[in-house]
Amino acid sequence: MTSGDAMRQIDALVSHVWMVRAFIKHSEEAEDDSELRDIQHALYDYMLALGSAWKEQNAEAYLKQAKKKLGKLRQATDQFVAIQPEVSTHMNFQMAAASLRFAVGEIEVILAATE
């Protein structure tokens, strides 16, 4: 896989991260839960860090940032998955946790393959 291919695949997965972030941000539960707000901010920060490299189509810079920020993305994902049942057992929250866990797991696989 070329670095350009890896960048494009990760960016497709980041669309899932974006949708989960938007779901959390606009949920009623996030209005009163600072932990949920922190999670959605962490998800946003990951995507923001990749933005300029994506805009420039600079795969090396994109992958470098994706690796650099991966720990915080993984931490936010793990935190959301852990607290999701306490926040809400609604299927929307269950699917958001599953989607985020899948997307971040795939991002990790792609980044590991680029090392």
Image (cartoon, rainbow, N blue to C red):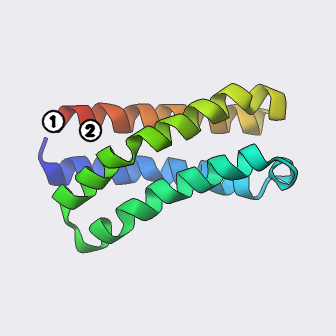
Q: Position of residue 95 (x, y in %)?
A: 66, 34
Q: Would residue 97 be found to the left or right of residue 49 on screen?
A: right
Q: Quadrant of the N terminus?
A: top left
The amino acid type of the residue labelled 2 equals: Leu
Q: Which mark is residue 111?
A: 2
Residue at 24% x, 73% y: name it: 56
Residue density around tag 2, few if under 14, some if 14–19, many if 20 or more, within 10 Å: some
Residue at 42% x, 31% y: name it: 105
Q: Would residue 18 be found to the left or right of residue 114 on screen?
A: right
Judge by depth and name the residue closer to the eye, 106 or 71: 71
Q: Is residue 52 above or below residue 46?
A: below
The amino acid type of the residue labelled 1 equals: Glu
Residue at 52% x, 48% y: name it: 16
Q: Is residue 35 above or below residue 87?
A: below
Instruction: Give SS at disc 2.
Output: helix
Would you say the residues marked 2 and 1 are in contact, meaning their CB atoms lie under 8 Å apart?
Answer: yes
Residue ID for mark 1: 115
Q: Position of residue 14 (x, y in %)?
A: 44, 51
Q: Would residue 112 be found to the left or right of residue 43 on screen?
A: left
Q: Quadrant of the C terminus?
A: top left
Residue at mark 2 to residue at mark 1: CA–CA distance: 7 Å
Q: Is residue 56 visible?
A: yes
Residue at 21% x, 60% y: name it: 61
Q: Would residue 71 be found to the left or right of residue 77 on screen?
A: left
Query: Which residue is at the far left?
Result: 2
Q: Position of residue 81 (x, y in %)?
A: 64, 29
Q: Is residue 72 above or below residue 51?
A: above
Q: Position of residue 88 (x, y in %)?
A: 83, 33
